[in-house]
């Protein structure tokens, strides 16, 4: 009690009180902190599973690029058959 | 008189030269090798999706050699043309495969999108969705 009294006299001590509050909250809400930690771990493990769909998207993009290329080459490959009938 | 005879001789010589040159040049742009044509018609070899020739089932070593020989020539051709088109050899080969499967004749074999060998009928061939 004797320690708290001078602290209350300083009007600018609100910021210092925050530190004190933090310590109190940690002790009181250890359960909450634990559950947040668990949630954090779950989030991290969630990030790992997100990587799989990312790979799938990359493959899809490659397919689109290839398809465009195949369409572009259509005339050239036809000419190639006419120019080299011995190997086709 | 003498001059015109000389001229005629020169013309004849030129014609003979042209014939000889044509004779040499012809095999370069020749049609399919008869053994290859026979193997195609018999369904022993088929056109694959990737632009190369494949043996259908187990074939003799002669057929296997024929296929690998043509595929080496195809790869060289694809490499050259892919460079000119600024695409990868694989991309060029696949585009060529689309065209080659479309050009198969009735009775010849081609590879369907699922990888199985199909015999070409008068109906359009089953091609990969990426084909034009």
Image (cartoon, coloured by chain):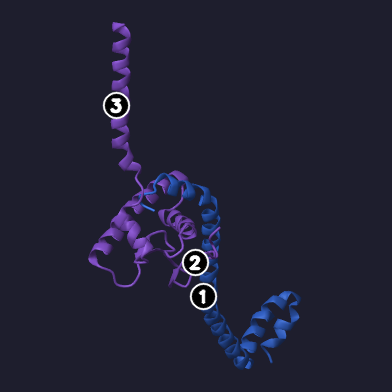
Chain colours: A blue, B purple
The image quadrant where one finds the N terminus of chain A is bottom right
- Residue that mark 1 sits on: A52
Q: Nearer the viewer, residue B77 or B59?
A: B59
- Residue that mark 3 sits on: B16
Task: Tell me whether circle 3 and circle 2 mark residues in contact (CB < 8 Å).
Answer: no
Name the image quarter holding residue A67: bottom right
Chain for mark 3? B
Distance from disc 3 to disc 2, alpha carbons, whole Å, reads: 46 Å
Q: Position of residue A42 (x, y in %)?
A: 55, 84
From the image, state whether disc 3 or disc 1 is nearer to you: 3
Q: Secondary structure at mark 1?
A: helix
Residue at point 55%, 54% (across, down)? A71
Distance from disc 1 to disc 2, alpha carbons, whole Å, reads: 42 Å
Chain for mark 1? A
Task: Judge the density around disc 3: few (<14), some (14-19), many (≥20) Cα neighbours within 10 Å.
Answer: few
Q: Position of residue A34 (x, y in %)?
A: 57, 90
Q: Secondary structure at mark 2?
A: loop
Residue B121: numbered disc:
2
> Is disc 3 in the same subunit as disc 1?
no
Task: Judge the density around disc 1: few (<14), some (14-19), many (≥20) Cα neighbours within 10 Å.
Answer: few
Chain for mark 2? B
Q: Is residue B27 above or below residue B60?
A: above
Residue at point 28%, 6% (across, down)? B2
The tag earlier along the polypeptide, 3 or 2, is 3
Q: Is residue B114 above or below residue A71?
A: below
Q: Position of residue B77 (x, y in %)?
A: 37, 49
From the image, state whether disc 3 or disc 2 is nearer to you: 3
Residue at point 61%, 88% (across, down)? A26
């Amino acid at each position: 009690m004797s320690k708290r009294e001078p602290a209350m006299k300083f009007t600018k001590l609100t910021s210092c009180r925050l530190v004190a509050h933090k310590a109190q909250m940690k002790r009181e809400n250890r359960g909450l902190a634990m559950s947040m930690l668990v949630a954090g771990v779950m989030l991290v493990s969630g990030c790992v599973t997100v990587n799989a769909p990312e790979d799938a998207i990359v493959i899809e993009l490659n397919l689109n690029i290839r398809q465009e290329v195949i369409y572009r080459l259509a005339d050239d490959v036809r000419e190639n058959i006419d120019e080299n009938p011995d190997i086709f | 008189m003498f001059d015109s005879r000389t001229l005629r001789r020169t013309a004849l010589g030129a014609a003979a030269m042209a014939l000889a040159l044509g004779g040499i040049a012809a095999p370069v742009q020749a049609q399919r090798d008869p053994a290859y044509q026979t193997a195609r018609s018999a369904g022993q070899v088929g056109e694959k999706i990737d632009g190369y020739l494949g043996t259908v089932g187990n074939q003799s070593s002669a057929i296997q050699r024929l296929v690998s020989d043509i595929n080496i020539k195809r790869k060289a051709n694809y490499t050259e043309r892919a460079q000119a088109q600024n695409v990868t050899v694989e991309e060029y080969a696949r585009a060529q495969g689309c065209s080659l499967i479309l050009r198969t004749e009735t009775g010849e074999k081609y590879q369907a999108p699922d990888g199985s060998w199909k015999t070409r009928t008068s109906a359009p061939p089953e091609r990969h969705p990426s084909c034009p």
